[in-house]
Structures are given as C-alpha cells and as structure tokens.
Image (cartoon, coloured by chain):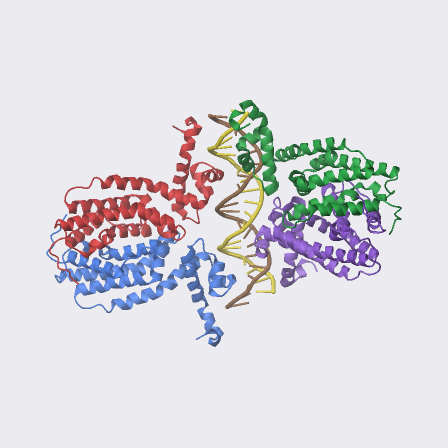
Chain colours: A green, B purple, C blue, D red, E brown, F yellow
Amino acid sequence: MDAPTRTRARRKAERPGEILDAAFEEFVRNGYAATRLEDVAKLAGVTKGTIYFYFETKERVFDEMIRHVSRPVFDELNSFVTTLEGPFRARLRALIGFLYGRVARDRVSRETLRFLIAEGGRFPDLVERQYQEFMEPFVERLREVVEAGIAAGEFRATPARNFPEVIFSPAILLDVWWLLFDERRKIDIDAFVDAHFDLLMNGLSGAGTPIT
Amino acid sequence: MDAPTRTRARRKAERPGEILDAAFEEFVRNGYAATRLEDVAKLAGVTKGTIYFYFETKERVFDEMIRHVSRPVFDELNSFVTTLEGPFRARLRALIGFLYGRVARDRVSRETLRFLIAEGGRFPDLVERQYQEFMEPFVERLREVVEAGIAAGEFRATPARNFPEVIFSPAILLDVWWLLFDERRKIDIDAFVDAHFDLLMNGLSGAGTPIT
Amino acid sequence: MDAPTRTRARRKAERPGEILDAAFEEFVRNGYAATRLEDVAKLAGVTKGTIYFYFETKERVFDEMIRHVSRPVFDELNSFVTTLEGPFRARLRALIGFLYGRVARDRVSRETLRFLIAEGGRFPDLVERQYQEFMEPFVERLREVVEAGIAAGEFRATPARNFPEVIFSPAILLDVWWLLFDERRKIDIDAFVDAHFDLLMNGLSGAGTPIT
Amino acid sequence: MDAPTRTRARRKAERPGEILDAAFEEFVRNGYAATRLEDVAKLAGVTKGTIYFYFETKERVFDEMIRHVSRPVFDELNSFVTTLEGPFRARLRALIGFLYGRVARDRVSRETLRFLIAEGGRFPDLVERQYQEFMEPFVERLREVVEAGIAAGEFRATPARNFPEVIFSPAILLDVWWLLFDERRKIDIDAFVDAHFDLLMNGLSGAGTPIT
DNA sequence: AATGAATGAGGATTCATTCAT
DNA sequence: AATGAATGAATCCTCATTCAT
C-alpha cells in the first residue's frame, strides 16, 4: 500500500487521479484563476510537465477535477435511491436526510457548489452536466415521493408538488451558510434539520387550508 | 449635464462612484482575479492611473465596490422594515416578499451573493460586514415577527422559531438557482413564491402536532 | 520667525529653498531614482504641482538641490582660506583639519559625495562643477602650502608635491567609510586624525631619503 | 563550444553566471533602480522569464551579481596573501600594490565600490559581507605587517599602527577619483603610487619625532 | 502661485504553455 | 512517461509630468 510496494505501472495508472485530487485542494484554496498549476503539481508530487501530459489545459484540469471528485457522489446517490421504502414521509425524510449528509459533512459537495457558483460563467457546460447528473435525479426522486404521498393521502395536494426545490431548500441554505462563514458561524445542524422537518411535515400534512 | 459642461469639481465628486459601478460590471463578467483594472477604467471612461488615484489596490476597489452597490439595498431594507403592520402572517409575507424582490429582480443583490461565495476566502471581513449589515437585521426582524405571531397565537410554537433561516430558505435557493443557471432554467417565480407560502403558512399554523 | 508672522511674500521667497531642503532629505533616503517627487512635496509642505512651478524636471530638482546644499560649504571654504597663517605645517594641518571638519561632522558634504559617486554617470556636469568649485580650490591651496613649505625648507621635496591628494586622502577614506558603514563601524576620529598627521608630518619632514 | 553544440545541461549550468555577468554591465550603466531586468535578459541572450526562473527578485539578482563578480577578487586576495615574504617594507609595498592593482586596473572592483556606496542603504547586509570577506582580511594582513615591522625595528611605532586604513588610503582616493571622473581627469598612476610610497615610507621610518 | 486630478508610459513579476531531453 | 528549462503575453502598480482651475 505504501509507495515502494506499488509497481510502476500501478502508480502510472493512478497519476491522473492524484493530480485531480491535488487540483481540488488547490482550486478550493485559491479559486480557479488564482491557482497555479505548479502548485497542483507540487502537491501531487509531479512536475508541471506531467500535468500537461495528461491534460491539455488548465481549463481541462478544472473540468475533469469536478468530474473526478463528483463521481463518488453520483454513485452514492444512485445506490441510495434504491433503498427507499416505507411510508412516504419516511422516504421524504430519507431523501432530504441524504442531502443534509452531503451538505453538512461532505466537503467535496460543498466546494463543488462553490465552484459552480463562482466559475459557472466560464464553464456553463459543467454546470449543466452537474445539474443533470446529480440535482435533476434527486429532484425527480423527490417529486415522485411527493406525488405518491399525495396520491396515497399522506400529503396535502400542496402546490409545492410542482417545486420540489421548496421542500429541500433549507439544506441548500445550510450549504450556502457554510460556504460563506466556514467555521465562523456555527449552526446546530441537528436542531436545524429538526426545525426543517417539523415545518415541512406540518406544511405537507393535515387538511391544511391554503392560507394567504 | 454632459462631460464638457460639468465642472472639474463636480466630475471629481462623481468619479469614484463611476469607477465602482464600472468595477461591478467587470467583476460580474470575469470574477475578481480575471478582471483587469484597465478594463474597469475603460468602462468608466478614465485611465488606469485614475483608478489608482482613488483606490490603493485592486482589492480595495473590490471591497469598496461591494460597499458601494450594497448601500441602496441597506437603505431599502431599513426603510421597508418601518412599514410592517397588520396581522403577523401578513408581516411575515411582506418580509419574505421583500427578500424575493431582491433575489428575483435585483441583479446587484444576486451578484453580491456570488461575490461573497466566490471570493469570501479572500475577503472574510467583507463577508462579515455584509452579514451584519444586511442578513442579520433581516433575520432579526423575521425572528421578532415569528415570536410575536406565536405569542399572539397566530403561529404554532414551531422549533423553526430558533432558525428563521428555515423560513425564508426557498428565496435563497431561488437565488442560487439563478446564479447557477442564469436564464437557462426559467422558474415561474410567482408560482414558486406561492408554493413557498402555502407550505410555510400551513407549517406554521394549526395545532399541528410535530410529526417525525 | 514662526509661520504666522512670516509675510506671504517672505514665505514665497523661501519656497524653492524649502523644496530643495526637502529634496535633499528624500534623495539621501532613497537615492535619485527611487525618490518620488510627491514625497519631496509632502516633506516641504507643498504639492507636486508647486515643485513643477519652480523646477522643470526631477533632474533639475536634483541638480539645483546639490547646488543649494553646497553653497554654505563653498562659502565656508572661501572664508576659511583667508585665515591661513603661521608655519606651513600649521597651515597644512589647518587645511586638512578643515576637510575633516566637513567629512566628520557635516552630513551634507558626506551625502553630496555619495550623490556624486552614485549619480555621476547621469550628471557629469554636476560632478565637474562640484570639482571645480570645491575640490580644485582646496587642492590648489594645499599645493601652494606644500610648495611654500618646501621652498622654506620646512618640508622635504617629496614627489607628493605633485599629488596633493595623497596628503589628504585619509580624510576621504574616512568619508567613504562613513558612506559605507554609517553608524555601524565607529572609528575614533580624533585618534584617526592624529595618526594621519603623525604619518604625514614625519613623511614630509627630515632629510628623509626616498625609500623604496 | 558555440550555442548550438552545447548540450542543454551545459547551457543550464552556465546560465546563472551569464545572467549575472549581464546584470553587472547593466547595473554599472544605469544603477540599481534604473536598470530594467528586460535589458539584462537581452544582454544575456535570454528572456525576462528566464531570469525569474533563476532568481526570485531584482534585489536577489543584484545581490548575487555582487557575490558573483567578487568571487575572483576574493580568490586572488587569498592566494596573493600567501606569497608575502622579504623585508616588511617590501611586504607592505606588495600589499598596497595589490590594492592599486585592483583599484587602478580592475573595473569590477571599482564598480563594486560604487554599488556599495550608492546602494548600501538598500543592501546593508551586502556591504557587511563585502567588508568581512574582502576589506577586513586585507586590513588585518596590513596590520600584521606593520606590527611585525615595528617589532623588527624596521618601522617607527607610529600611531597609524592602530589605523592601517591611513596607510593605504591614497589607493581608495584614487578609486574614488575614478568613480567620479572616469576618463575625464587622468592621473599618472605610477607617479601617484610613487608619491604615496615615498611619503609613506618616510613617515614610517626614521627616529621620526612625532611632529604636531 | 498653487492645487491636485488625470494621464500613460514603463517596469517588476506571474504563470500557462511548450519542447528538447 | 516525465522532466524542468525557457518563453512571453499579461497585469498590477508606480510616478514623472501636465493642465484646468
């Protein structure tokens, strides 16, 4: 497992990934424009030339880095979705809980959102790709659960059925807070999540006359 | 009113503001690092040197630009807050409506959020300042309305009273969506807002037993 | 004598001198190229524009500054020379003592030498002028005293009569040391001067057979 | 031996030295502040970027340039010192003759002194280093010879034994003259040196009553 | 006389990219 | 595959100089 025991061939096969991992760290630290490929190389334990052997330009490094670090997230989402079962409110809770899991504990997911917001203008295709591969499936699963819950009489026929984003938005807010304040403004995440669910489940339940 | 008729003194008084307005546009277009002060100068109709006559460094231009474009928002929030009246649900709606107004229609507010997320690491003081001057007062007003509403029996004693952010989070999500997709994924804002309020008001009302 | 009592006219008459005094300080601190006229202005209590009212260019400021601060030195030398009297060795001692007085105690003379060495390439005329107005008269007086001393039998017919510089060179070395080490390598000046005179007077006196 | 036949590695090993040689020429011509690294690069046959590949800043280029051009002088002094022999007056003459050799014929030594005088304020460490590596050893050797000569009865017990600088100061003056007047005021160096030695040897010899 | 806003050429420094080895 | 020397365009910032007031 340590360097010496690795065959040269294995090392080679891992190079691109190591470079992209290093790139993630540097891009997180400085942002796209202020990151120097030389620093990425140093962190990856290679030289600048090696990066250019594997990637055409800095833009490509960034683009592939996002792809690289997002892959586990995709996989996790996909395998998670198949586990949904039980009452719809439980499924809803599980789905949103999954999102909090990413948001609250996964640095990669958080920083990816920052990248998309910060550099989206320069990489519109990347934003589109991320949306289609991650957010859209998630939103669709959520929509299905809500619709099924309404059909089953568990949920009210709320207009939020057309905007599932409304349902999980507190998790996104928590993410944004994190991106803004880092460690500086701590939030009690568990209590926050509880408050979210309390409000949500009450909002979705009951005869709830639409109130204006 | 055109350049030649303006006195030198009048022009001088306006220069910094003109430069900061131009800076806003260029920083929006390219981000902090990729913006060239020379382009800012060109857009402002002055030369590089003039910018450095008024501002010490590029960082200062950025910092003061944020201050400059945020001032109207501060003022608007302050004067808006004094107009709150009526039933608490109406006040709540007005408060959140104000936020949607910024988010949905005000490019400056949106892009300021992008700046804070993208460059917050480089300008932590700026993030802190923006929070204290804009978000914190807003959150406090919201908290007051919720508490008063609960005291008056209009709202449930929801745990969300401790996390007013949960209450307005859909507006932030809408903002993030905008930052990510710009014009590419249109959302029917009015319907979105209605969905938000429907869910919220139902969540806050009724005897609503906390449901897990 | 203090500012308020000065008439405006008097103040005006003194402006150029005040500017040149300030210029001396700044040029001493930073050297010619690294000195900013703006700092000179600030130190003189005027604005950049005022400097350009009195002087055409930065080069002229420098040139006139040297002239300005050297004037008292010229005057002193001229009036000093008329006081020479007594035995020739006393006159010689007085002349060289005068030089030590400048070198050891007069910051202006020291720094002027630095300017001439450092910027002589850019201001050859200035070097020439300083030589002709200060060093040449001094050397000539020295030569006269030596020649008269030889004629009177007080001194040997040393070949140094043709190179009076040899005679006072320790004073120049002291100056150079000062320019190099400032306060960092203190020399006991009085003892140094005594050593100089001891060696010099012995070298000039006696039947002293030229020894190789 | 010409560029094309040199291997890349060989060229690389020589690059820093070539750059520093070019830097010497440009710094001599313009002084520190007025020298553009781009001109240094051009003279060295490389581009700006190459200089920054080898040296961090302009200051470092200057500092290392001084080190670089001084090395041969150090070496020469060191090997020269070991050759001293014969009567002490001969040794003294040889030592001072060595100094004249540098001063009168070696442009590098002359211009280094100019650099130290002109830029010493900006590079105090450099002045200190040069003093310790070159002037101090020289002065020490001189002091030893003088003391030994006094002990042997060859020299008078002159107070100049405590200030060896007095003994070689005419060489420094010659150097300063050169820095000031370049080719414009020729001095017959051989005659100057003879005058120096005549005065010096007479000053050191004989029963020489201290004369005031 | 004096101000100080404005200019713009100039120079230090950075860094993505190339390519000979 | 990998290196790292070399390039040069790009950009921040400075400051002598000008000139309207």
Q: Is residue D77 left or right of residue C20?
A: left
Q: Is residue B160 left or right of residue D160?
A: right
The number of callouts visible is 0
Q: Which residue is at a point 74% across and 33% down the rendered structure image?
A: A80
Q: Quadrant of residue C157?
A: bottom left
Rendered location of residue B166, percent (x, y):
75, 49
Q: Looking at this view, is B170 or B27 the one in front?
A: B170
Q: Which residue is at a point 74% across and 43% down the rendered structure image?
A: B177
Residue extending farthest to the bottom is C5
Q: Which residue is at a point 61% across and 50% down the rendered structure image?
A: B123
Q: Looking at this view, is A200 or A124 the one in front?
A: A200
Residue D4 visible in the shown view? yes
Q: Looking at the picture, does residue A181 appear above or below residue A91? A: below
Q: Looking at this view, is D120 or D19 the one in front?
A: D120
Q: Quadrant of residue A22?
A: top right
Rendered location of residue B180, percent (x, y):
72, 42
Rendered location of residue D177, percent (x, y):
29, 52
Q: Looking at this view, is A166 or A113 the one in front?
A: A166
Rendered location of residue C90, percent (x, y):
19, 65
Q: Which residue is at a point 85% across and 51% down the rendered structure image?
A: B207
Residue B65 visible in the shown view? no
Q: Looking at the picture, does residue B33 appear above or below residue B55? A: above
Name the quarter where the N terminus of chain A is drawn. top right
Q: Looking at the picture, does residue C117 appear above or below residue A23? A: below
Q: Is residue A107 left or right of residue D211?
A: right
